[in-house]
């Protein structure tokens, strides 16, 4: 490999930013001083440097934090230290919304203008700023952001704060936020807001039978001792008694289905990894939660972080993984801080590491932060991201259970899926399966937001209907008439009133051509301009497409353009022709895109058109695509583990 | 597996039964669906596939229907399985291929694409007009500076394109990314599959993704070694020798006056086959046949560009 470095020599500051992550270079190869005796005729260190490529994203994060951007000198130095071609480092750095390869001010406010925040004044808030999007003023700027996962408290903002004069500043997100508060942060101030609770069921009177939310609002998320006082780590103890085979049996018997969107049987996946002949095995927790309207994983991680750490430990032991990665989206600073602390405390107390709970088994857990890319929630894109490549989904087959992270057998599960395992182990598989329905066992977390009276995360047994969910959350905000309900997020579908009695199960929603997705239930009252909402969703997919395949890369652009035309009432030819075009785009995106992003990008729009929710287009329009949407995730993911 | 990997004489390959459009074929295990389709002379469009590169299956124009799969399958990279039932001429297949070509043609200048691409665009009745007139071109370097996750929403009345000025920054070849369909071939040829130089990579995201050097620096400031192997694989004429570009700009490029001559490079002992394109008895472009056992279509700077000594100005 040619590692050509143009002559942007790193400054001391740029070196320091990188060395803080990697340590001082010890070889000439990696950019250090030449050891005249050792390296007089040979060069050492290339293999070691290349083996560290997986540190690329953490290093870029560190540089962004310290310098406020990825400068050419620092990029060059990273390339040298890791023996990664500079063009590839650049390709990775430019993939993420939170990294900038152009100089920008140290304070960046990411103000959410996504669908839930729009229903709660985000646009009015943005209108109140006196600068335009992206414009720089006195060391600060603001940009519009896709959903920040704080929808229950909308409108939301996340503040990305680089060091100033060597003084470290921690990122933070807050909601509900006001224009004055955003302005204050842009002016160098600070907002301290204690957001209201996110789980109405845990407020008095506390709901009965909560499982996943059991400790929320009760346990101190920063204290391992308090977690143990509330039953923490009894599941791991029991799992160690059961042994890997026993845990696998209980998980299989529980009929637990993945909660990340693809509804894949967890037991099947675990068995496949446990029995994979190649070693080492890796475990990944998918905490990239970026589907607009989704915030359940954030609530679990913020309020009960040890539960996830314990559940991952059990998963690791059961499937023969000695190393786990927790990949969390970059916009979740509080959850990141709590999990970092939880991992540190668990390691210090022998609950992670060489000898977990004195069992002789080994399990190490490492947290990795995303940097602003919805696509990195797709499992193989996530693996590429951890490995230090662009977050582009891979081809399947091979499936991750065979060749995943670093080409090794890999178990990847969603946060909620994993936390369910605690209950499966504490009782047993069949007992767990008693709650819910035959095919959808256990409880499910739903994220209610938009025009709803009591927004938040709700835990209900599978089988609860949409109507019951709306009642539980107090119905439409201020008792206004309901215009539309979006189920499953931007990649989901709109549900008509006649179908409100459908049980919210995997099989129930499949029957009506919908999908639970990540458990989003977003309400829009009669004041909402639905075309505006649909256009924002189209913009989201255009922004988040990785760009690899044509149907998604160009299709999302053409879909947005056609929608903008519908919204402005100025068709290209005729409205009917534009609706036909949208239907044709939908077919190719569903059929020919590589991954679930492209496959589901037209789903919500087509369902809105089919239901007659779009002004000016009647529900019977023949060009609308009413064929089934493949259930998220890649290719034949459902057919094989 | 790479096509240009050494041929190992291993065990005998099992034969599998594959049904293509109602006819059963026995084909060796490990073949891709495309291998079978090509053997059977079933015309299948491909853009990102090339025999000498690892399939990236990004363009999605070669899709076929496979029984049991909910979505279409890329024939260029999917290996056949015993009992597989493949359909290549259904409405779904035709629609997807048409749309992929249409989406590309509506956003990219395809006028210099390979002849086969034009044939496919006619076959599948590509109509770019329904997306509206092309939007305004981007200024120099503007597409390279876009931030991932952010874009300006247009009024929808024009179709956004990748149009932008040609990058002319050296004497050997030019990069006209207004013609780039992001097939990843040049990146593969520059990196892992041939040259191992990694001067260019995909940067940015989504529709704003580009092929770029680090910080979009000019080629002379990058790792480029001017082997020109990226030119050799580019299907749309986005990458082109400067000699050809200059003639096209001057209006003197005239294929009717051109000949192809095959010869052997004399610069070193490797003995690469060269395919010279000549016009009026002057060399105007050098390639190498992609099925040649030594080069697999790839050359070095000397073979591809080192010919001025035989035809001084
Ligand atoms: C575009 C896209 C985004 C995704 N985002 C997430 C995510 O944020 N969290 C998640 O758990 N799964 C996400 N998934 C699904 C994952 O690919 C994968 O199926 C899931 O993590 C498996 O976990 P499970 O079996 O526990 O559901 C996404 C899929 C796609 C196609
Ligand atoms: S469907 Fe979209 S996000 Fe998925 S691989 Fe293709 S371009 Fe990337
Ligand atoms: S420049 Fe040519 S070879 Fe490279 S990605 Fe674009 S079209 Fe493909
Ligand atoms: S093209 Fe380069 S490698 Fe091939 S024979 Fe000529 S000088 Fe040698
Ligand atoms: S935080 Fe704004 S839509 Fe979710
Ligand atoms: S040729 Fe098969 S996907 Fe491009």
Image (cartoon, coloured by chain):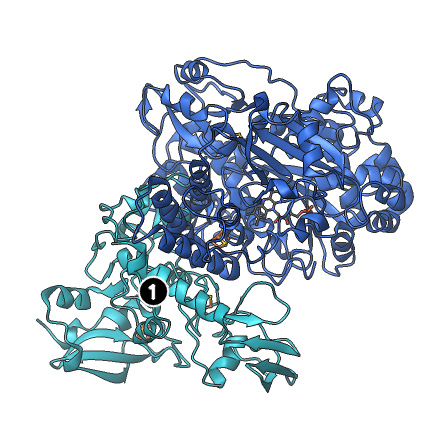
Chain colours: A blue, B cyan
Which quadrant of the view contains residue B43? bottom left
Disc 1 is placed on an element classified as helix
- Residue drawn 63% across the image and 43% down it: A498
Q: Where the N terminus of chain A falls, by quadrant?
A: bottom left
Question: Whole-percent x and y of residue A548?
Answer: 45, 55
Residue shown at 22%/63% (left/top)? B172
Q: Position of residue A363 (x, y in %)?
A: 75, 41
| Res A69 quadrant in image | top left
Q: Chain of mark 1?
A: B
Would residue B78 appear left or right of A277 to someone viewing this image?
Answer: left
Up/down of B166 relative to A312, above or below: below
| B122 on left or right of A115 | left
**Residue depicted at x 61% and y 29%:** A336
Is residue A613 in view from this perspective?
Answer: yes
- Residue corresponding to mark 1: B230
Q: Is residue A34 visible?
A: no
Label 1 crowding class (10 Å Cα cut-off): few <14, some 14-19, many 20+? many
């Amino acid at each position: 490999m040619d590692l050509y470095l143009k002559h942007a020599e790193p400054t001391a500051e740029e070196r320091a930013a990188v060395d803080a992550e990697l340590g001082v270079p010890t070889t000439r190869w990696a950019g250090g001083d030449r050891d005249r005796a050792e390296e007089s005729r040979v060069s050492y260190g290339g293999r070691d440097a290349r083996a560290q490529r997986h540190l690329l994203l953490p290093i870029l994060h560190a540089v962004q934090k310290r310098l406020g951007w990825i400068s050419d000198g620092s990029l060059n130095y990273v390339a040298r230290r890791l023996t990664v071609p500079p063009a590839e480092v650049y390709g990775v750095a430019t993939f993420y919304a939170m990294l900038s390869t152009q100089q920008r001010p140290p304070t960046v406010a990411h103000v959410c203008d996504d669908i839930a925040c729009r229903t709660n004044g985000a646009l009015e808030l943005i209108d109140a700023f006196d600068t335009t999007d992206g414009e720089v003023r006195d060391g600060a700027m603001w940009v519009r952001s896709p959903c920040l996962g704080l929808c229950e408290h909308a409108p939301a903002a996340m503040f990305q704060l680089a060091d100033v004069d060597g003084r470290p500043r921690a990122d933070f997100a807050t909601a509900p936020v006001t224009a004055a508060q955003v302005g204050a942060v842009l002016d160098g101030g600070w907002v301290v807001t204690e957001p209201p609770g996110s789980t109405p069921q845990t407020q008095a009177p506390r709901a009965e039978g909560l499982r996943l939310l059991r400790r929320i609002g009760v346990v101190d998320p920063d204290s391992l001792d308090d977690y143990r006082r509330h039953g923490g780590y009894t599941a791991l103890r029991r799992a160690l008694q059961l042994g890997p085979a026993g845990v696998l049996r209980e998980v299989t018997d529980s009929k637990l289905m993945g909660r990340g969107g693809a509804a894949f049987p967890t037991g099947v996946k675990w068995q496949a990894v446990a029995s994979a002949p190649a070693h080492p095995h890796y475990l990944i927790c998918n905490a990239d939660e970026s589907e607009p309207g989704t915030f359940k994983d954030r609530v679990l991680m913020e309020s009960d972080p040890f539960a996830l750490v314990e559940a991952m430990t059990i998963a690791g032991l059961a499937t023969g993984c000695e190393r786990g990665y927790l990949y969390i989206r970059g916009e979740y600073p509080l959850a990141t801080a709590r999990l970092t602390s939880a991992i540190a405390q668990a390691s210090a107390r022998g609950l992670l590491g060489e000898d977990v709970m004195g069992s002789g088994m080994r399990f190490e857990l490492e947290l990795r932060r995303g940097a602003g890319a919805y696509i990195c929630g797709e499992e193989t894109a996530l693996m590429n991201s951890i490995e230090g490549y662009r977050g582009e989904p891979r081809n399947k087959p091979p499936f991750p259970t065979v060749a995943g992270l670093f080409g090794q057998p890999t178990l990847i599960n969603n946060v909620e899926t994993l936390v369910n395992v605690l209950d499966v182990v504490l009782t047993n598989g069949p007992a767990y399966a008693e709650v819910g329905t035959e095919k959808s066992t256990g409880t499910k977390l739903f994220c209610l937001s938009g025009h709803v009276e009591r927004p938040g995360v709700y835990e209900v047994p599978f089988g609860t209907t949409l109507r019951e969910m709306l009642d539980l959350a107090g119905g439409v905000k201020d008792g206004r008439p309901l215009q539309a309900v979006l189920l499953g997020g931007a990649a989901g579908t709109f549900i008509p009133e006649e179908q409100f009695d459908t049980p919210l199960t995997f099989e129930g929603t499949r029957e009506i051509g919908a999908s639970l997705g990540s458990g989003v239930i977003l309400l829009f009252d009669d004041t909402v301009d639905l075309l505006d909402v649909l256009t924002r969703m189209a913009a989201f997919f255009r922004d988040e497409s990785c760009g690899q395949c044509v149907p998604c890369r160009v299709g999302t652009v053409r879909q947005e353009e056609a929608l903008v035309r519908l919204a402005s009432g100025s068709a290209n030819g005729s409205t009917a022709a534009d609706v036909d075009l949208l239907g044709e785009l939908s077919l190719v995106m569903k059929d020919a895109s590589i991954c679930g992003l492209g496959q589901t990008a037209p789903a919500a729009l087509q369902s809105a058109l089919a239901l007659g929710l779009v002004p000016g287009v009647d529900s019977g329009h023949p060009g609308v695509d009413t064929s089934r949407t493949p259930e998220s995730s890649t290719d034949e993911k459902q057919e094989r583990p | 597996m790479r096509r240009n990997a050494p041929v190992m004489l291993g065990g005998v390959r099992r034969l599998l039964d594959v049904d293509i459009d109602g006819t059963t074929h026995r084909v060796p295990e490990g073949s891709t669906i495309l291998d079978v389709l090509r053997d059977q002379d079933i015309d299948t469009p491909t853009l990102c596939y090339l025999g000498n590169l690892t399939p990236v299956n990004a363009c999605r124009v070669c899709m076929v229907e496979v029984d049991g799969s909910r979505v279409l399958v890329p024939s260029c990279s999917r290996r056949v399985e015993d009992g597989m039932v493949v359909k290549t001429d259904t409405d779904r297949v035709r629609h997807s291929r048409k749309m992929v070509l249409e989406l590309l043609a509506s956003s990219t200048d395809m006028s210099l694409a390979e002849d086969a691409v034009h044939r496919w665009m006619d076959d599948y009745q590509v109509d770019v007009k329904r997306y509206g007139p092309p939007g305004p071109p981007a200024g120099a370097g503007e597409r390279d500076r876009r931030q991932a996750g952010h874009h300006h929403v247009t009024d929808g009345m024009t179709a956004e394109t990748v149009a932008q000025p040609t990058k002319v920054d050296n004497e050997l070849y030019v990069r006209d990314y207004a013609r780039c369909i992001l097939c990843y071939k040049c990146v593969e040829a520059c990196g892992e599959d041939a040259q191992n130089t990694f001067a260019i990579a995909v940067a940015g995201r989504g529709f704003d993704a580009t092929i770029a050097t680090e910080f979009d620096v000019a080629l002379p400031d990058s790792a480029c070694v001017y082997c020109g192997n990226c030119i050799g694989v580019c299907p749309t004429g986005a990458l082109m020798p400067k000699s050809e570009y200059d003639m096209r700009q001057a209006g003197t490029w005239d294929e009717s006056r051109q000949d192809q001559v095959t010869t052997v490079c004399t610069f070193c002992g490797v003995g690469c086959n060269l395919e010279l394109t000549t016009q009026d008895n002057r060399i105007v472009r050098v390639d190498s046949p992609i099925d040649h056992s030594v080069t697999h279509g790839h050359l070095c700077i000397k073979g591809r560009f080192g010919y001025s000594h035989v035809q001084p100005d």
